[in-house]
Image: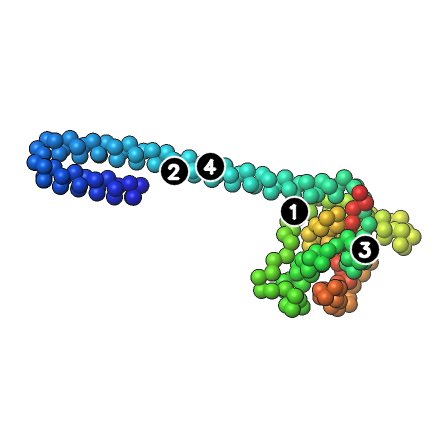
Amino acid sequence: MKKLISIILSICMAITVGCIVSGCSNDELLQRLDGLQTELIAQGKKIDEVQTQNTQLTEKLGEMQAMLDEQAKEIKELKLKSASSGKFYAVEEAYENGFLTLEDLKSIAYYNNGGRRYNEAIMSETYAPVPKIPEALSEGMQLIIKSTAAKEFNKIFNTTYAEAKGFRITQYFGIYGDCVAVIMLNDYSGIPGVIWTETIANVNFNNIIEIQIWRALL
């Protein structure tokens, strides 16, 4: 808009000078200036319309991106929910079986350790882990994981009293393919008191004993 005004003003100056040199009357000069002013107003309105359309288009694109992000979250969880059951693995076991990649390990370690701590040698200052999508597990997904935990607890300890409601997912580190990385507590056993750092494929994990990898049985 400012550029258009500058151009029009320059043209006005040129017309004024031209009229003075060629001997135009004041009426002729005013008519030409009025015509340019009318054109300026018309062009200004067109620019305002285009700017409004661009703003509306930007807002629409933002809404569409938000919808796509939400659908991506739903699709990622729905794939796992379709399994309705799963199995737990230790982090190293899941990696050795090919359920987790090296990049998955680094991301889980980053979330678990609270950043690059213990892994500064393999994670640059600009390192970014795999985004947690979704950012939080739905109640339905949590129920499936906790049901698996109760089932495995009863099997290991030859009991029948463990139930999904007795388990709590205290931390969630993301979904990696058909695996979910979590830390869980339950009402049936004590809280592990030992904390140590373990290295898997040159990736250091602090307090790894608590991390569990739930894998969907698809």
Name the residue tied to disc 1: 134
How packed mark 1 is, by other alpha carbons closer than 10 Å (few <14, some 14-19, many 20 or more), is: some
N-term-proximal mark, 3 vs 2: 2
For the residues marked 3 and 1, what is the alpha-carbon distance in whole angstroms? 25 Å
Name the residue tied to disc 4: 57
Cβ–Cβ below 8 Å for labels 2 and 4?
Answer: no
How packed mark 4 is, by other alpha carbons closer than 10 Å (few <14, some 14-19, many 20 or more), is: few
For the residues marked 3 and 2, what is the alpha-carbon distance in whole angstroms? 55 Å
Residue 149 to residue 109: above or below: above
Q: Residue type at mark 2? A: Gln
The spot of residue 88 in percent (x, y) is: 81, 52
How packed mark 2 is, by other alpha carbons closer than 10 Å (few <14, some 14-19, many 20 or more), is: few
Name the residue tied to disc 2: 51
In the image shown, does 140 or 46 lie closer to the viewer? Answer: 46
Residue at 57% across, 61% down: 126
For the residues marked 3 and 4, what is the alpha-carbon distance in whole angstroms? 47 Å
Name the residue tied to disc 3: 97
Q: Residue type at mark 4? A: Leu
In the image shown, does 157 or 83 lie closer to the viewer? Answer: 83
